Amino acid sequence: MSKTIIIIPSRLSATRLPKKPLLKINNLSVIQHVYKRAKESGVGKVYVATGDKEIAEDIKKINGEYILTKKKHKTGTDRIYEAYTKIKKKVDCNYIINLQGDEPFINPKDIINLNKSTLKKKSDICTIATKINKNQFLDESIVKVITEDNIMKKKISKTKTFLRNYETSKKKNIYGHIGIYQYKTSILKQFVNLRQSNKELMYRLEQLRAIDNGISIDVVYTKNKSLGIDTVKDYVEIKKIMEYKI
C-alpha cells in the first residue's frame, strides 16, 4: 500500500510579510497551526522544512518534527525535495504532500480527501480547489485553476492551466486554488530537476513548470475555503476569524 508523508516548507524572509510563520493567532504561531492541522489529518508523518532556526525552535515548542535545509531556495518545492533527500532512508513513502506554511485555515478533511483521491487515481501530482465568484477572477492574490471537467460534479479532473487573473466570466471550470500538492516521489525528483519555465517566472506560479513539461496535475474539489496569509490584511482577517469566530 502506498504511504504518504507531509512536509511543510516555511521561511522567515517572505517578501510581502516577513516573519509571517511566527505571527500569533490564538497564542499559537501560524506555522504551529499548520503543523497541527496536518497532524490532525492522520495521513502520515509530518515535518516542517526550514532554513531558519527560529522556525525550527518554534516547532520544537509543540514537540513537532522539523528538517533543517539550506536557507535559500528558488521555490518551496525545492525546499521540500531537499528535506525529503535528508530523510528518505529513514521514512518509507511513495507520496509527499507539500502543504504551504501559510495556510492555518486548512481543513484536515481536505488533506485526507486529497490523499485518498491521489492514491485512487495514482496521480503524478494532485491538488485541491474550491468555488469562487466572478468578482474574484481579477483578484491576483487568488490563484485560479482551469480544469477539463466540472469538478463540482466529477470531484476530480485534469488541469488545463493556472493563472492569477481572468478577464472574462465566459470561461468554464474556473476555481480558486488552495496551496497544497501531493507528488509521487519520482515525479517530485523529476520536477525539481527541470529548469524554471518562462510561464512559471512570468506568473510566479511554479506549478506551471509541471504543465509546461507535460506532467499532468489532477484537481480535487472541496466546498471548504482555505485562506492563505500573504499580506498584513490577510493576517488580520484570518486572526479575526480564528480568534473571534467571525
Image (spheres, rainbow, N blue to C red):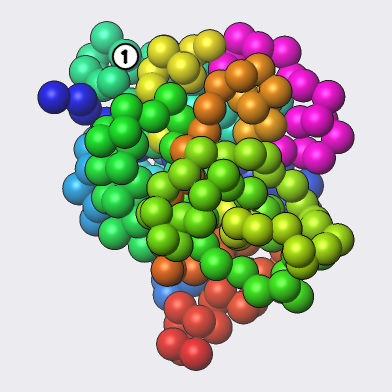
Q: Which residues are magenta?
A: 191-206
Picture coordinates of residue 86, whole percent (x, y): 39, 14
Q: In the image, is residue 235 above or below residue 16?
A: below
Q: Is residue 229 visible?
A: yes
Picture coordinates of residue 114, whole percent (x, y): 35, 46
Q: In the image, is residue 50 above or below residue 173?
A: above
Picture coordinates of residue 89, whole percent (x, y): 27, 9
Label 1: which residue?
Answer: 88
Is residue 135 covered in magenta? no
Residue at (51% x, 38% y) in the render:
158
Q: In the image, is residue 63 above or below residue 210?
A: below
* Quadrant in which the N terminus appears: top left
Residue at (25% x, 21% y) in the render:
93
Residue farthest left in this picture: 1
Q: Which quadrant would residue 137 be assigned to in this image?
A: bottom right
Is residue 200 covered in magenta? yes
Q: In the image, is residue 182 above or below residue 94?
A: below
Residue at (65% x, 12% y) in the render:
194
